[in-house]
């Protein structure tokens, strides 16, 4: 599996705090190896759009779609509490 970040996701990652950036990289390694990795907490977020959500850390999430053998990361954002 490969990972593709949208321009929006790249900009959001660049604007995120450094610990979030580092955690995102770690989570991408988990994602590429195993979508069901327990640290990701990956789940279908929007069934109609085939959109998934996974955890970066306690406070941040990333959203993606699965397109063949590619994870398309669309955005990263703080998780509302």
Image (spheres, rainbow, N blue to C red):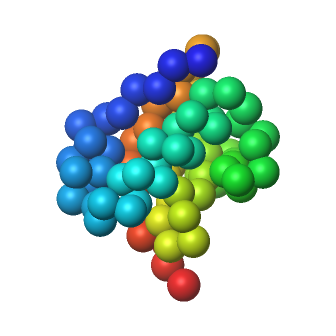
Residue found 45% across the figure and 42% down from its top:
25
> 81 above or below 69?
below
Residue found 41% across the figure and 51% down from its top:
22
Q: Nearer the viewer, residue 48 or 51?
A: 51
Residue found 21% across the figure and 59% down from its top:
15
> 56 above or below 67?
below
Quadrant showing the C terminus:
bottom right
Q: Quadrant of residue 48?
A: top right
Q: Give the percent coordinates (x, y) of residue 10.
A: 26, 42
Q: Give the percent coordinates (x, y) of residue 30.
A: 64, 38
Quadrant showing the N terminus:
top right
Task: Say left or right for 47 vs 38.
Answer: left
Q: Give the percent coordinates (x, y) of residue 66.
A: 59, 28
Q: In this rendering, does residue 48 appear at all?
A: no
Q: Nearer the viewer, residue 33 or 9?
A: 33
Q: Give the percent coordinates (x, y) of residue 76.
A: 40, 54
Task: Say left or right for 16 vs 30.
Answer: left
Task: Say left or right for 62 vs 51.
Answer: left
Task: Say left or right for 27 vs 16.
Answer: right
Q: In this rendering, does residue 80 appear at all?
A: yes
């Amino acid at each position: 599996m490969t990972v593709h970040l949208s321009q929006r996701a790249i900009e959001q990652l660049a604007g995120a705090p450094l610990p979030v950036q580092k955690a995102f990289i770690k989570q991408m390694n988990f994602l590429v190896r195993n979508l069901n990795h327990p640290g990701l907490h990956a789940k279908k977020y929007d069934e109609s759009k085939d959109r998934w959500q996974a955890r970066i850390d306690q406070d941040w999430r990333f959203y993606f779609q699965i397109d063949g053998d590619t994870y398309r990361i669309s955005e990263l954002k703080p998780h509302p509490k």
